[in-house]
Image (cartoon, rainbow, N blue to C red):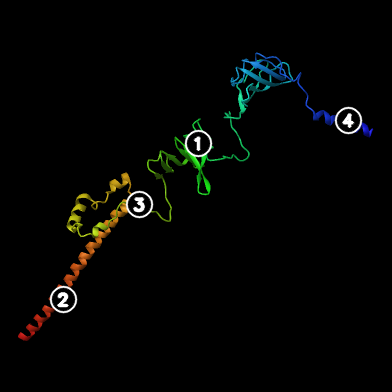
Amino acid sequence: MKKRITLIALLFISSYAFSQQIGDGFAPLYTPDFTAPLKSGVYGGFNAIGSNPDLSYSGQQHLFVIRHTSQVNNHQLQISSSFITNDRLFFRKIANNLVASNPGWIEIATRGDNTFEGSQNINGNLDIFNYTNKITGFGDPNNYYIGSFPVAGSAGLDIHYYGGIRFGDYTSNSVMQIADGNVGIGTINPKNKLDVNGTIHSKEVKVDLLGWSDFVFKKEYNLPTLEEVEKHINEKGHLENIPSEEEVLKNGINLGEMNAKLLQKIEELTLYSIQQSKEIQTLKEENKSFKTLSERLSKIEQQLK
C-alpha cells in the first residue's frame, strides 16, 4: 500500500514537470477575425479583423486566446504580437455574449519605446542609469523631462518643463511656481526673478549695487541748503530723490536703491550737523568775546562813578 501511494505521488509530480504540446506544436491556419468567438488556443492571422496595431510585418500576427468555459458568451483573454522579431506585445479582454466589445489593444511592453494606458504603479526604485537617460513627457525629450546632470563627485536632479514647474501642498495647488525663468512663492505667474506673497524670514540679506552714497562727502557735491530742503518739502510733500507715499504704495520700493537713498540723506544730515556745530562753536567764541568786552565795560563804568 505504501509503495502504491509513493508511485502515485511520483506520477502526479511528473505530470506537472512536463508541459503539454498544443496540437502538432504549430499554430493552426490563419483566422480572418480575432474578435470572433475563438476557442482557447493559439492562432495566426493575416490582416485579420481586430488585429493588434503592430502591422510591421505585412499584417501577419500571432494570437494566444483563453476562452471562457461558457459557450454562450465571448469572454476572451487575448495576447498578440507581430511575426517580426521586434518584441512588441499586446493584450486585451473582449466580451459581450457572442458579440466582441472592448476591441482596443493595450501594449504590454516592447524592447524599444513603450506606450502604456492607465495608471502605472511601481513598487520599488526607478533608476535612471546615466545622465542621458530621462523621464520625458508629451513625446518631447528636449523640452519636457526629468533627468540628472553631473556635479563634482555626484549628480544633480534636472527637472525641465517648457511651460513651467509648479509645487503644491495641502494649502494650495501652487505654493511655488517656476515660469519664464521667474520663481513665485505664494503667487502664480511671477513677473520677477523672485516674487514672494508673504513674509521673508532670513538671518541676512545681501544686495548687489552699482554705486553707493559716499559721493555726498566729495568736495564737488552741491549740498542743498536747508532753505532749499524746506521749499521742496512744502511743494512736494517728501524729501528730494525719495519716492512719495503714492509711488511706494503703487510700485513698492527697491531695497538696495532705497537704502542708498536713505544713506544719502543721513550723510547730508551729517554734513548739516557738522556745519551747525561749526556755527555753534563760532557763536560760542563770539559770545565769549562779547562777555569779556562786557566785563571790561562794567569795570570802566565802576571806575567812572
Residue on which the image places disc 1: 145
- Gap between marks 2 and 4 measured at Cα: 135 Å
Residue on which the image places disc 2: 288
At 61% from the left edge and 37% from the top edge, which residue is drawn?
Answer: 122
Residue 305 appears anywhere in the view: no
On-image quarter of the C terminus: bottom left
The amino acid at mark 1 is Tyr
Which sits earlier in the primary sequence, circle 1 or circle 3? Answer: 1
Tag shown at residue 8:
4
The amino acid at mark 4 is Ile
Judged left or right of residue 198, residue 248 is left
Q: Residues within 10 Å of mark 4 (few under 14, many from 20)?
A: few
Name the residue furthest right. 1
- Gap between marks 1 and 3 measured at Cα: 34 Å
Residue 277 image offset from top left, x and y in percent: 21, 67
- SS at badge 1: strand
On-image quarter of the N terminus: top right
- SS at badge 4: helix
Which sits earlier in the primary sequence, circle 4 or circle 3? Answer: 4
- SS at badge 2: helix
Tag shown at residue 123:
none
Q: Nearer the viewer, mark 2 or mark 4?
A: 4
